[in-house]
Image (cartoon, helix red, strand yellow):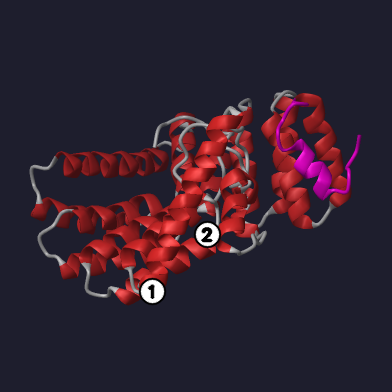
Amino acid sequence: MSSRTKGRRPAPSPAPAAGRREPFAWLAGGVVLGLLVGVIGTTAVLRPEALGLSSPGPPQAAASPAVSAEQALAARVERLRERLAANPRDAGALLELGEVFAQAGRLDQAAAHGERALEVAPDDAEVHVRAARLLRSLHRPEEALAAARRAMELDRQALAPALAAFDAALHGAGDMAAAREALDEARRRAPDDAAVARAGAELERIEGLIARAEADPRDYDTLVQLGNYWYDTHRWEQAADAYGRALAIRGDDANVITDYGTSLFNAGRHDEALAQFERALFVDPQHWQAAYNGIVVSLNRGDTTAARLWLDRLRQIRPDHPEIPRFAAQLGGGAG
């Protein structure tokens, strides 16, 4: 995790945040989600925990490569279905299909396939490692950590289980003690491995942030970096606390304000979240992510009148945003 401020990043999302991505899991799935509905025959369900916030989208892909990607994914899904039809206990196929669901933002289905893989291969360390990584990507850190710890029991020499446990603890659960325990085990298994050294440096960095924030509660940059860490691990109250303390020192960064609002939203504090998105637009009237997030929160609250007003603001700031037609359709045409 870098020390950047975000203001663009999604909240709960099954894939690593690499740059700028679309906020809604159910919207961000886009082509992949539609394809899965057609191939697998299931339907998407809008859930509050699948809502993400504050992220501009990547450039739109050209039409012909997008079609090619759809065809490749359809063929992949069909192969996996055939494998599972022939052998419903094929843990590898279950995990791979779970990964496809994760990429499409279908969190529950992805987790179910990972859990099923663990059921059919309870003594396979590699399956547990892969399931741990999948569950961590789905922001189910406790389950991911349990799978990784089971992998360590099944294979007492391989490095991968210890590193999976470290990742689940530090980057999933935000559990420093569990991360230290996994790191110690990784060092026992492979003391000279470069990945182990990187893990140690990362843990020291996060522990250092926490210590500096405690020692100097007026250190703005440290508080923002600590907020980013808690945000990335979905510890929303801790993230909101760190961002709020930073903004009390300096309140002129619309990205930090938007991340603060996103954290408040995910902590269930919707009124406060909307106030922060208003604040972000006051600081930067062109910060379209705040307007986008206003739509998200208003829809989550069932307040279509407010959502239409936020949609008007998004249209004014970024009239070419690709999700405007989708929001307008959801709102029955919306304003304008």
Q: 65 above or below 133? A: above
- For the image, the number of numbered tags is 2
Question: How busy is the neighbourhood of tag 2: few (under 14 within 10 Å), some, or many (20 plus)?
Answer: many
Element marked by disc 1: loop
Q: Is residue 71 visible?
A: yes
Residue 115 placement: quadrant: bottom left
Left or right of residue 313, residue 206 in this image: left
- x and y, in percent, of residue 277 in the image: 71, 38
Which residue occupies 58% across, 41% down? Answer: 244
- For disc 1, the marked residue is 88
Report the magenta residues as a range: 318-336
- For disc 2, the marked residue is 107
| Main secondary structure type of the part rendered in magenta | loop
Which residue occupies 48% across, 48% down? Answer: 73
Which residue occupies 8% across, 42% down? Answer: 192
Left or right of residue 105, residue 171 in this image: left
Q: Nearer the viewer, mark 1 or mark 2?
A: 1
